[in-house]
Image (cartoon, rainbow, N blue to C red):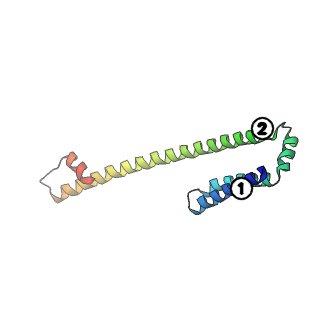
Amino acid sequence: MIVAAGITFAVLVLALIIVMLLRRQLREKYATLWLLIGLALLVISIFPGLLLQLTHILGVEVPANLIFALSIVLLVGVSLHLSWELSRAEDEIRRLAEDVAINRAEIEALLRRVRDLESPGSSTSSADDHHRSR
């Protein structure tokens, strides 16, 4: 019964990952890791003796302790990677916001120059320019 539940869970995880990939809700670089985890779950569910052998080889007393230790290592790795990705995204967003601000200022300056050239006798306030440029 436990083996069937483990196999069912592993198959559901793999199916969820594949569905998310097909719907483009999960990027390929993340899907690779999760597919490997899903396949590892499936193999351990089908052949529970492998976990016992691995536990014995690594000198761990209880197989559950090995699973918990591997899970913690995996979660720390995923958290570190996501923090790195978030830092890169924040830097890119900041750079893009600065570029947009520079472009907006240049466009407003060009609009003022065009208005000045179109009507040399009248000058408009910068507040009017600001409202018109949006």
Q: Is residue 73 left or right of residue 129?
A: right
Residue 132, horizontal then vertical, whole percent: 23, 53
Q: Nearer the viewer, mark 1 or mark 2?
A: 1
> Is residue 116 left or right of 60 when viewed as pictured?
left
Name the element at disc 2.
helix
User: Residue reaching furthest top?
Assistant: 61
SS at mark 1 in the image: helix
Residue at 21% across / 46% down in the picture?
127
Residue 67 figure quarter: top right
Tell me the number on the disc at residue 80.
none
Position of residue 57 in the picture relative to residue 130 (left or right): right
Residue at position x 87%, y 46% from top?
53
> Mark 1 or mark 2: which comes first in sequence?
1
| Residue found 17% across the figure and 59% down from its top | 118
Q: Which residue is mark 1?
A: 8
Kindly indicate whether the residue at mark 2 contacts the one at mark 1 (C-beta within 8 angstroms).
no
Indicate left or right for 36 with 18 as reference.
Answer: right
Residue visible at 70% across and 39% down? Answer: 72
Q: Position of residue 13 (x, y in %)?
A: 67, 54
Residue type at tag 1: Thr
Q: Where in the figure is residue 48, as x and y percent of width and height?
A: 82, 50
Q: Amino acid at mark 2?
A: Asn
Q: Position of residue 97 (x, y in %)?
A: 41, 47
Q: Residue furthest left?
A: 121
- Say the numbered circle drawn on residue 65: 2
Please tell me whether residue 32 is drawn above or below residue 59 in the rendered image: below
